[in-house]
Image (cartoon, rainbow, N blue to C red):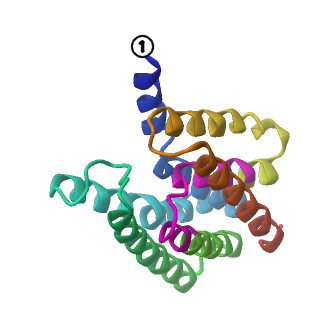
Amino acid sequence: MTPRSAAQRITYLLEPKNWIIATVVAVGWRSDGAAGLGWGLLAAFFAAVLPMLFITRGVAGGRWGDRNVGARRPRLIVLAFILASVTAGLAVLAALGAPRELTLYFGCMLASIAVLAAITVVWKISIHCAVASGSATILSLMFGPPLLPAYVLVALTAWSRVELEDHTAAQVIAGSVLGAAAAVVTYAIIPR
């Protein structure tokens, strides 16, 4: 396996959708046990599944080149869709009485996406790294030291994005710092 093929595999396996699904399901479970798993899956539908379907359809229709959506204008279109999907998900979670912890987490996720979109207007910050770092941080804060090794996956994500020349080192570092900072703020806001 070459470094490039390893980087492609890592980028695929550790893409934002996978981190988001794991994180919202974990937050749901933590907030309400078995019932929370269902809430987490509903949240994952809006935060990960619908956006991935939109991206996949865009690739199939030739609107963007691949799942990573590297060009700025298409990235902004995708981010606008994700903002709309997460907003709709937040409204559904709140209306149906989802656990407060999950609803607040989802609201903080919405704010983070808005910040990433604003930065993307002028600079190609790594969304892969922001999501990976934010997920590793929130999970480590919620579940403790056993989840600290998740940061190895964040480092692998950062390496893969630079190896594939999709981002510079500065872009992956900025994404990682932003994601971790957003998670720390989120953790401070959500009830425990």
Q: Which image quarter: residue 71?
A: bottom left
The front one of 77 and 85 is 77
Please provide percent x and percent y for residue 111. Answer: 61, 75
The front one of 64 and 148 is 64
Residue occupying image coordinates x 48% and y 60%: 44
Q: Main secondary structure of the magenta part?
A: helix
Please provide percent x and percent y for residue 102. Answer: 65, 69
Residue occupying image coordinates x 46% and y 52%: 17
Q: Is residue 92 above or below residue 152?
A: below
Counting labels gives 1
The secondary structure type at the circle numbered 1 is loop
Q: Which image quarter: residue 153?
A: top right
Residue occupying image coordinates x 23% and y 53%: 59
Q: Is residue 185 above or below residue 156?
A: below
Please provide percent x and percent y for residue 148. Answer: 78, 38
Name the side, left or right, on which 51 lies relative to 112: left
**Mark 1, residue position:** 1
Quarter of the picture containing the C terminus is bottom right
Quick check: is 62 in the magenta stretch? no
Quick check: is 126 in the magenta stretch? yes
Q: Is residue 71 visible?
A: yes
Q: Is residue 33 visible?
A: no
Q: Which image quarter: residue 9?
A: top left
State which region is magenta.
116-137
Residue type (three-letter) at the residue carrying disc 1:
Met
Quarter of the picture containing the N terminus is top left
The front one of 53 and 151 is 151
Please provide percent x and percent y for residue 158. Answer: 59, 39
